[in-house]
Each structure stands twice: as structure tokens, then as C-alpha cells.
Image: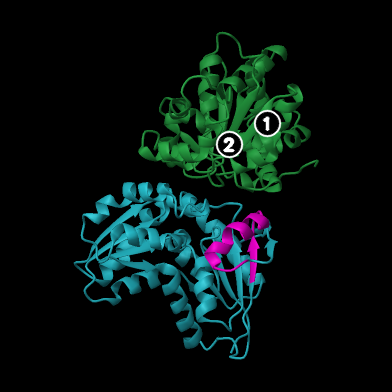
Chain colours: A green, B cyan
Amino acid sequence: MDERPIGVFDSGVGGLTVVKELRRLLPTEDIIYFGDTARVPYGNKSIPVIRRFCLEITRFLEAMKVKMIVVACNTASSLALDYLRRNTELPVIGVIEPGVQAALRDPSTKRVGIIGTTATVRSEAYQTRLKRLRSGCIVSALACPLLVPIVEENLLNSPIIKLVLEMYLSNFRTMNLDTLILACTHYPLLKPAIAEFFGDGVRLVDSAEETSREVAEVLKARRISAPRTHVGSSEFYVSDSPDAFMAVGSPFLGYPIEKVFLEPVWQRDVESSG
Amino acid sequence: MDERPIGVFDSGVGGLTVVKELRRLLPTEDIIYFGDTARVPYGNKSIPVIRRFCLEITRFLEAMKVKMIVVACNTASSLALDYLRRNTELPVIGVIEPGVQAALRDPSTKRVGIIGTTATVRSEAYQTRLKRLRSGCIVSALACPLLVPIVEENLLNSPIIKLVLEMYLSNFRTMNLDTLILACTHYPLLKPAIAEFFGDGVRLVDSAEETSREVAEVLKARRISAPRTHVGSSEFYVSDSPDAFMAVGSPFLGYPIEKVFLEPVWQRDVESSG
């Protein structure tokens, strides 16, 4: 039993899709969420810069006495997960491995598409892992940089999203994919539009759902779940513009965010062991 | 006479449209450019955060011994110009005043539209100044957050840009604007698409051109121009991903960028006098 909260972070609001699933699956757990809204997006930034930002956030979550860190951001998971594991005593869970496991749960999975940010795709984190676990699996990955601003602008039902999906995904439609991994925590909000674009026959894997299952398993295995009678709560911190986070974040979470605290994490001294 | 370089900065590549005009108008001047690519974009961030970022960059440019600072970013000019002037001895030139002056140069200007980032529009810097200088002038401003990622994705000739302009600007088309201020240094690359959208009759004011004229005037008035025989050069610094800056930046500048240096400005101690 462990009453400490779970720490979850993302570059901005996207990781709230993971919080939403965690709340649903683990209603007894407290959650502390950090969104790095002063430096969002991460998807077009470099490895050393992303690692530094992630370490600053980890130091903040440690100071908040969390029992576990969930990197609810595909870019940060792709580029900084091992680095964070070397730099904290806490268990660190990313979104990549749960997504890969979910994609391969069906033994007939053979042709997998991956969409994400430029940094996620370039890291080849998904591609390498999928090919290692299933030889013969055909993997294609594509960076779709416009999808994040489109989600943040709430254009989920506009004609623009159709045109943008056509531009990015029309090649994928001709490739007979059986599975498409939504390798960005913003994309669960695009699930209906993407499902409509592909029609039946392509399974969409949503890292938010899969990651919350992995969190539940680790809590159980390590015996650090919250007491069963506890009613879990959530607290939200950002590095900039709490009001904007409240407004933009609520659709990701599925319910209104009542209070957001400002936390300039770059004022922390960080030390890394490399 | 003053051989020191001119310092120019922006949140990313957009300010290169100003450098392009400076090079054309002032071929004898040396330029040092800084793009804050680790923290781009600024347009959805708050005033204190943007001010801090701008002050760090100003301290870097001071250390590089520039003779003047050009804030080649509408968001930073809207929110941090007076703040920077209080915090440096150097002359500081922004993009707002030159854009306003250009809009009002034609005495018949009466209906002015402004498009820019959320932060620029919300600051009301353009709106306030225009109304003060020309009473009775009707001013409408609109934030267009998708335009920057579209320019950075180089979708200038895609069907997407037409649809996005339609979404943002169709109200403006019914308002009989005589002038539209492109209040973001990314937008000069959209000039052909925007001009096609409005047809004749709407004058597009491009802050890059106007700002370089203002720089030329200040150099002359203060007698700090470079010697006439000098051949000006440019040096480029970024806070992240020099290679990406080289690739994305060249269309803004109009010629290939050969070398870009990495400069993590947040490692500087900054002190502000408020």
C-alpha cells in the first residue's frame, strides 16, 4: 500500500488523455500532472534539449513525493526514457512499450503503421522494438507535424482535418495496414476522424489506454497501489498559462479542470548522471 | 561609423524574413541572428515567460557586442519591447511601430485588419497604436494559430492553405478592408496566397520590409552605420537543432544558410530591472 500520488508529465495537454484513462482504470490513485506549456511542443526539438526538460520535470515530481513517473508523451518516451531511468530511483513508465505490446497482442499483426511527431518517428523507438519482437513485421512510420496544432485548435470536425489526413495518410491507405499506432498523446482525440478515414480493417492502437494498463500492472506487481477505500484526486501544474491549459485541456481529460498551478521548473538545479 | 553587428532575434526562423530585407537594404552591415528554436513558438505563451526568454537572448546579443537589437518577432515586440528597453542600454527596434506607420502612410487608410499569433492579437499592441494615431480608423484583429506550422511545414502551395485561409479570413473579406497587416514574421511567405485570397484592393503590410527601413533610419540618425566599404556578413545562432534551422530557414532568408551555431541562452544569468 502506498498513498503517494502517481506523477504524470507531458510537453503540454496531450498527456491528459493518459490521465483520463488512469482515472477510469485506477479511481483510488492520486495523480500529479505536469504540462511543460512554456516549452511545448517537444516534437521538433533535439535529444539533449528534451532530456534536460524531462529531467527538470522529474526533479519537480520527486519533490512532490510521487511514487512513480509516467512519461505521458511519445516524444519524451522515445528520446529520454532510459536517461530518466538512470537519473531517478522511481519506477518510470513510458508510452512506447505499452503501445508496442498492444499492437502485437493480435498474433496476426504483420503490417504496422506509426504516426507521431518528427522526433518520435526519427528516434525509431517504435520501429526497432516492433521489428525485434516480431521478425517479418512490416513497419512504416510517418511524422505528421500539423496534427498537434489542429487538435489544439479544436478543429476535429472541420473540413481541414479531412484534407490533412488525406495528405499524410493516403499512402498508408494503399499499404494494407492491419494496425496503426497513434504514437502521440494528442491523437486519441483524432480517433473518430482517423477511423473514418481508414474504414474497418485497420486497428487503431491508442497509447493512452495501453499505458494506463501498464501502470496498473506495475502498481500491483510492486505492491504500491493506493488503499482501496481512498478516493483519488488529481492536481495539475504547468510551466506557463494555467488559464489556457484549463480551457484547452478539458476536452483531453473529458471533464472540466478546476485549478491549475504555475511551476517554472527551469529554476530547479538539475544534476544528471548522464 | 560603427563596425559592430546588428543583433536580430526571433522565437525561431520567422525573423529571417527581416534579415533578408536588412541584407538587401543595408549590405554593408554585419548581422548576428538568434532563433530560440528550443522554445519556439512564443505565440501561445504568457507575458512573464516571453519577457524572460527575450532578456536571456538580449544578454547573449550584448555579449556578442552588437550595436542595436532588432526584435524580429511580433509576439516578442508586442509583449516585451518596453521591458527590454528598460533592461539594456542598446537601441531596441520592434516590428509593431514600423508596421503601424506603413499602414497609415496612405492617408485614406480606414479599415485595417491584423492577423498574427494569439499573444500578439491579445496584447492589442497594434490595435491601440493604430486607433491612437488615426481616430475613426476601424481595426479588426484575428489570431491565426495554424498559419505558423503551415509555413514551417512548407505547405505554401497545398490545397490546405486555401482552406485554412478561407476558415480564418472569410469574415475579413466581407469587411471592405483597405489594409491587412501581416503581424507575424512567418507570414511574408504567405503573401502570394493571401494576395490571391483577397484579390486587388487590400494592401498587405509586411513588417519585415518596414522594420528594415526603420533600422536604416535609426542607424543614420545615430551615426552608427557600418563603413561604406565594408561587406556585411551574417552569423546565425539557435538554442536547438542547428541542422533543422538550416533546412527550414533558407526559404525565409532566400539563400542557403551555411553554418549555424548552438547557444543555450538559458544558461545565462539574467537580471532584470523590472
Which numbered dot is residue A184?
none
Residue furthest to the top? A228
Q: Chain of mark 1?
A: A
The local crowd at label 1, few if under 14, some if 14 to 19, many if 20 or more residues have their Cα within 10 Å, is many
Amino acid type, mark 2: Gly
| Quadrant in which residue A226 is drawn | top right
The image shows a total of numbered marks equal to: 2
In the rendered structure, which segment of residues is drawn in magenta?
A: B235-256
Front position in the image: A161 or B76: A161
* Magenta region includes residue B183: no
Q: Is residue A213 above or below residue A86?
A: above
Mark 2 lies on residue: A116
Q: Chain of mark 2?
A: A
Q: Is residue B272 at all visible to an observer of this figure?
A: no
Q: Secondary structure at mark 2?
A: strand
- Give the residue at x 56% y 69%: B8
Mark 1 lies on residue: A126
